[in-house]
Image (cartoon, rainbow, N blue to C red):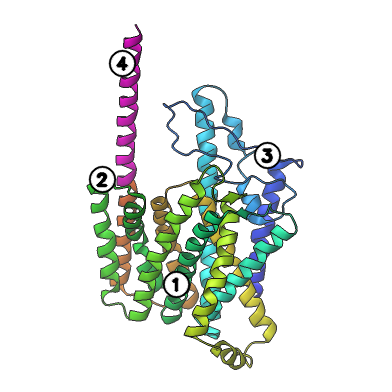
Amino acid sequence: MKFASLIAFFATSSVVVAKSASSGVNRVHQPRRRPTNPSSSCSVTLTSKDISLCPSSTVSPLDVAADLSVDSPADAIVTRGGDAEAGEELAVRLRVGSYFALWYILNIVYNILNKKYLNVIPAPLTVGSLQFLVGSLYSILLWGTKLRPGPVLTSKGKKEVNKVGFYHMMGQELSMMSLGAGPVSFTHIVKALEPFFSAVVSAVVFGKWMHPMVYATLIPVVGGVAYACLKERSFSWLAFWTAMGSNLAFALRAVVSKSALDASGGELGENLTSVNLFGIVTCYAFIQSIPLFLLGEGFSFLDLWKKALPSSSSFDLVRGLVVSGLFHYLNNEVMYLALSNVHPVTLAVGNTMKRVFIVVASVLVFRNPITVQAAIGSAIGIGGVLLYSLTKQHYEDLEKKRLEEEAKRKSKGRFGLRK
């Protein structure tokens, strides 16, 4: 637990130092307006609702992370014309890359701390609900102290956030059950299938179908994971099906959250930045998780707590729960920052690549060996994810060029008619 506290302090302090170095003086940054040149190669557009840039007086580590790129060295590259666009695109890529890197680090630490806690108190539904409570209190503290502007929801916004909160709650609780029923490595091998679920949900919910070759690249992803699980010595049907259910719930959460982030005109409410959205989602998820853990585990958590006391003090158990809850909240908050800048399928691909590091870290920490077959299957599945990402990007670029050429032809046609 001392290690966990040190990690939490280091993560917070390092981001605050980076913020101080980049800002210099206290000021509120205004969101930059992206150039509207249709020939620009940058496909990411920043708006004030995509991400909130907060004043340097805000001490939340995730608010600080959201502002890292505003005065970054990449801005010095900006000159004029094409160089300006290239400089801004590089700044965007660096910022999004920093979200993914921080997300990976926080998630790896959370998975290790979480599994250690479940080994002491095997009550996944109750522990998951209490972690939601920790995240909710963290958000309410920031809103109550005015360190972060509090969100205000419309009636439509409450309905949308309620849906996101339900998917988030189910995804997390099912993940907790899977982690409690088997090793961390097995759960994350199964959860490598998330891009498959995300692609299906994106098509069904958003109506966005991709090129057939893109879907074909999902075959090695599914096949690799199936091969890895076929003769896994730590195979558990409970761990498998709860991980699969978690994949579906998180895929639904991603696409519905993206829809909420992209909503315009304040139809869902005010101050709905990506981090504020996740804060409200966490509060809703906690409320919705209460009947679930009461029905599933009742008050067995208290008995398990008493049994754990001979080997751990009450202070250690409370501290472990709070630290794991904070890491759970912060890693998901960074994920929402990333989601506000990328497509849900891209996020799912990044999420799958993240699992490589989690599996390796869990094997090193918990000494749970994986078979050669599991390693080969995992490599095939993750390689399929990389192929999926490259293929998807290729066909998106082709479609973009086609639309640009079509727009040029229409423009020339209108110009000819005016003549």
Determine if the magenta segment contains residue 396.
yes
Instruction: Tell me how far mark 1 sits from mark 4, CA to CA.
Output: 56 Å
Instruction: Tell me how far mark 4 sits from mark 3, CA to CA.
Output: 42 Å
Examine the rendering and report whether any part of residue 234 can be seen.
Answer: no
Q: What residue sits right under mark 2 in the picture? A: 211
Reading the chain from its start, which is encountered first: label 4 or label 3? 3
Please tell me which residue is depicted at 54% across the width and 68% down the height of the picture.
285
Amino acid type for the residue under numbered disc 3 = His
Instruction: Judge left or right: residue 13 versus residue 193.
Output: right
Instruction: Tell me how far mark 2 sits from mark 4, CA to CA.
Output: 30 Å
Instruction: Tell me how far mark 3 sits from mark 2, CA to CA.
Output: 40 Å
Relative to residue 139, is residue 206 depicted above or below? above
Reading the chain from its start, which is encountered first: label 1 or label 4? 1
Q: Could you tell me which quadrant the C terminus lies in?
A: top left
For mark 3, does the 10 Å Cα neighbourhood hold few (<14), some (14 to 19), or many (20 or more) residues?
A: some
Between 288 and 328, which is closer to the camera in this rendering? Answer: 288
Tell me the tag on residue 29. Answer: 3
Reading the chain from its start, which is encountered first: label 3 or label 1? 3
For mark 4, does the 10 Å Cα neighbourhood hold few (<14), some (14 to 19), or many (20 or more) residues?
A: few
Instruction: Judge left or right: residue 125 versus residue 272.
Output: left
Marks 1, 4: nearer the viewer: 4
Tell me the tag on residue 39. Answer: none
Q: Measured from the top left, where is residue 295 in percent x and y?
A: 49, 84
Marks 2, 4: nearer the viewer: 4
Q: What residue sits right under mark 1 in the picture? A: 175
